[in-house]
Amino acid sequence: MPAKSKAQQKAAGAALSAKRGETQMKDLKGASKEMAKSMSEDQLEDFASTKRKELPERKG
């Protein structure tokens, strides 16, 4: 499933980085922390790999 906004795509990228051990979970905040806890690496990869060109900054 693709991300719905640039903010969601960025949060998924941060969560994926923590899931892979590239950054620490304690460094995550807000949505990215929740995403890391509740989503699989494959799901996060789908969100993070969404092209940002056509996405709104925030879903509103």
Image: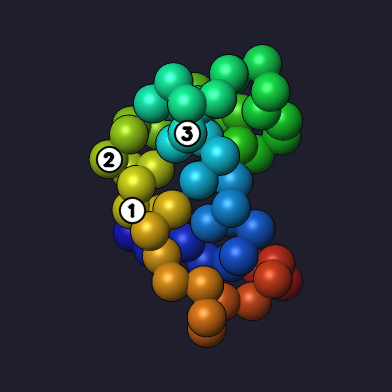
* Residue 28 relative to residue 12: left or right: right
- Mark 1 or 3: in front is 3
Q: Determine the secondary structure under disc 1.
A: helix
x, y percent for residue 18: 50, 26
| Cα–Cα span, label 2 and label 3 | 12 Å
**Could you classify mark 3 by the number of other residues whose Cα lies within 10 Å: few (under 14), some (14-19), or many (20 or more)?**
many
Residue 17: which disc? Answer: 3
Q: Quadrant of the C terminus?
A: bottom right
| Cα–Cα span, label 1 and label 2 | 6 Å
Residue type at mark 2: give it: Asp
Whether residue 7 is visible to the viewer of this picture, yes or no, is: yes
The residue singled out by tag 2 in the image is: 42
x, y percent for residue 32: 60, 37
Q: Do the residues labelled 2 and 3 touch (CB within 8 Å)?
A: no
Q: Nearer the viewer, residue 44 or 1?
A: 44
Q: In the figure, 12 relative to 21: above or below?
A: below
The residue singled out by tag 1 in the image is: 46
| Cα–Cα span, label 1 and label 3 | 13 Å
